[in-house]
Image: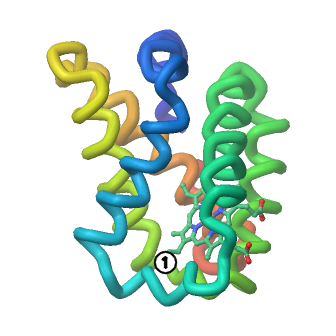
Amino acid sequence: MSLNVEVLEQSFQQVKPRASEFVTSFYDHLFIAHPEVKPLFANIDMARQHKMLLNALVLVVENLRKPEVLGQALKGLGARHVGYGASPQHYGAVGEALLVTFEEYLQQDWTPEVKQAWLGAFEVIEAEMLQGAGEVPSIA
Ligand code: HEM
């Protein structure tokens, strides 16, 4: 597990006051860079989806100090994503869009250390979710 908890918490606090725009921007980046994932969201209420993604990010950041809680929640989330049509390749697209959005919002505070922290966090999130989806053995 590669989690730089302080840096993740602090940088997330910085974007939290603009969380709603952050999530909208995340989906914009995702759909522009990876139009192939758009059909998966075709029948989804996107306003509700935005809130759920935000809740998931808050859950991750709030449970960084409780790896068991976080691991269980992410495995369950990953298992549900099989039914949503998410494949392992899609996780790369989501991770990339998330990092681009953080860069956009943090600007000069998007330092190499912060970038490394979120890359590491996403690796953990992806590994746990894919494990829950039954795709790959745990690397955690
Ligand atoms: C960082 C990784 C991800 C997180 C944190 C995340 C989070 C969520 C959350 C919280 C929901 C709400 C439903 C639930 O809790 O089961 C959801 C739904 C959904 N996710 Fe993700 N997701 C991730 C990756 C992906 C990927 C890679 C795809 C595929 C492109 C995807 C596609 C979807 C779709 C289509 C739904 C809508 C399901 C429905 O309402 O029918 N997600 N996601």
**Residue 113 placement (x, y as % from top left):** 26, 20
- For the point 30% across and 28% down, the residue is 105
Relative to 94, residue 86 above or below: below
Left or right: 32, with 51 as reference point = left
Circle 1 sits on which residue?
A: 88
Decide which of 87, 127 is in the foreground and name it: 87
Left or right: 65, with 136 as reference point = right
**Residue 21 placement (x, y as % from top left):** 45, 38
Q: Amino acid at mark 1?
A: Pro
**How many tags in the picture?**
1
Q: Quadrant of residue 111?
A: top left
Decide which of 47, 64 is in the foreground and name it: 47
Relative to 40, residue 92 above or below: above
Decide which of 119, 41 is in the foreground and name it: 41
- For the point 70% across and 78% down, the residue is 134
Decide which of 66, 21 is in the foreground and name it: 21
Left or right: 14, with 74 as reference point = left
